[in-house]
Amino acid sequence: MLEVTRNLNKKMKNPAYISYALVEASLYANINKINTALCSNF
């Protein structure tokens, strides 16, 4: 776990990585919303 945090800290110093991570996070959030909607329809 510490290793993961250390790698994240390194990557977080890179602005391009931060914006990529934000896009990825919003994509995951949208996918979760879609999955929830699909599951509640069935």
Image (spheres, helix red, strand yellow):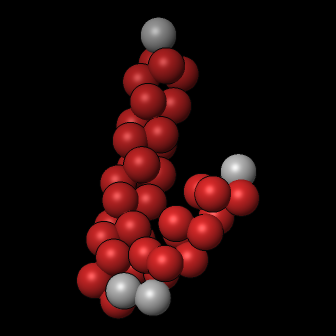
Q: Position of residue 3 (x, y in %)?
A: 63, 57
Q: Position of residue 6 (x, y in %)?
A: 61, 69
* Residue placed most toward the observer, 12 or 10: 10
Q: Position of residue 26 (x, y in %)?
A: 40, 61
Q: Residue sitting at 53 percent across and 69 percent down?
A: 8
Q: Is residue 24 above or below residue 9?
A: above
Q: Is residue 14 above or below residue 33?
A: below
Q: Give the farthest residue toward the front.
A: 3
Left or right, 11 with reference to 20: right
Q: Residue sitting at 38 percent across and 41 percent down?
A: 31
Q: Is residue 32 above or below residue 13?
A: above
* Residue placed most toward the observer, 9 or 16: 9
* Residue placed most toward the observer, 10 or 26: 10
Q: Report whether residue 21 is seen.
A: yes
Q: How many marks?
A: 0
* Residue placed most toward the observer, 37 or 6: 6
Which quadrant would residue 18 be assigned to in this image? bottom left
Q: Give the farthest residue toward the right.
A: 2
Q: Residue sitting at 45 percent across and 88 percent down?
A: 13
Q: Residue sitting at 53 percent across and 22 percent down?
A: 40
Q: Report whether residue 26 is seen.
A: no
Left or right, 27 with reference to 3: left
Q: Give the farthest residue toward the top.
A: 42
